[in-house]
Image (tube, helix red, strand yellow):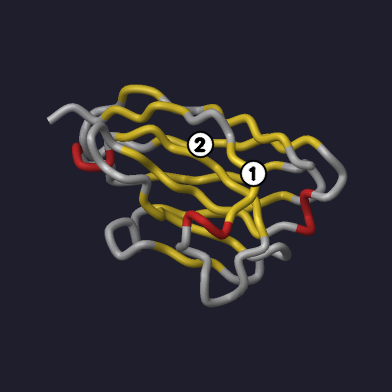
């Protein structure tokens, strides 16, 4: 079992930056691939970024590639998402997730077993 708690969300002007964190409990954090997903009002939850259990492989949605960076610190049981050049369309609740999706399935929401409660990111237009 892994419990996940996100933090770091808030309101930021377009072009600004935020860093999200996801603290994991349990001693098996390093066994899981980790992902960030987001959900805007009236929309389905969508993939943002993922990182392999070792941190050696990262994956990004095209909409955030070049602006967002996912990373993890297995010694601290923490996942991060550095978000730069934020846009109004990045406004959403951001969720971290843990699972064993396999290399072809990192973007698939159904491949993750554990989810945090979410943190709101708002970028006004």
The relative height of residue 70 versus residue 9 in the rendered view (above or below) is below
Q: Can you tell which mark lies on residue 114?
A: 1
Q: Quadrant of the N terminus?
A: top right
Q: Can you tell which mark lies on residue 68?
A: none
Is 1 on the left or on the right of 92, as rendered? right
Question: How far across and how far down the image is residue 45, in percent?
Answer: 37, 45
Q: Secondary structure at mark 1?
A: strand
Whichever of callouts 2 and 1 sits on the residue coming sooner in the sequence is 2
Determine the residue located farthest toward the left in the rendered image.
125
Determine the residue located farthest toward the top in the rendered image.
11
Question: How far across and how far down the image is residue 75, in percent?
Answer: 82, 47
- The crowding category of the residue bearing disc 1, from other C-alpha atoms within 10 Å (few below 14, some 14 to 19, many at least 20), is some
Q: Quadrant of the C terminus?
A: top left
Q: CA distance from mark 2 to mark 1?
A: 17 Å
Q: Secondary structure at mark 2?
A: strand
Q: Nearer the viewer, mark 2 or mark 1?
A: 1
Question: Number of numbered discs present?
Answer: 2
The residue depicted at 39 percent of the width and 26 percent of the height is: 120
Question: How far across and how far down the image is residue 74, in percent?
Answer: 77, 51
The residue depicted at 28 percent of the width and 46 percent of the height is: 85
Question: Is residue 64 or residue 114 the one in the foreground?
Answer: 114
Question: How far across and how far down the image is residue 66, in percent?
Answer: 34, 62
Is 26 on the left or on the right of 104, as rendered? right
Determine the residue located farthest toward the bottom in the rendered image.
104
Report which quarter residue 115 is drawn in.
top right
Is 44 on the left or on the right of 34, as rendered? left
Is 111 on the left or on the right of 125, as rendered? right
The residue depicted at 52 percent of the width and 76 percent of the height is: 104
The residue depicted at 18 percent of the width and 27 percent of the height is: 124
Q: Which residue is mark 2?
A: 20
């Amino acid at each position: 079992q892994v419990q996940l708690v996100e933090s770091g969300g808030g309101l930021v002007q377009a072009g600004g930056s935020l860093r999200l964190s996801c603290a994991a409990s349990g001693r098996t954090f390093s066994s899981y691939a980790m992902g960030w997903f987001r959900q805007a009002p009236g929309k389905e939850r969508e993939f943002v970024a993922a990182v392999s259990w070792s941190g050696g492989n990262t994956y990004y949605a095209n909409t955030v590639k070049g602006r967002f960076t996912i990373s993890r610190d297995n010694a601290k049981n923490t996942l991060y998402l550095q978000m730069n050049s934020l846009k109004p369309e990045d406004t959403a609740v951001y969720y971290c997730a843990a699972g064993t999706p396999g290399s072809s399935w990192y973007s698939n929401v159904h491949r993750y077993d554990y989810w945090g409660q979410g943190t709101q990111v708002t970028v006004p237009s």
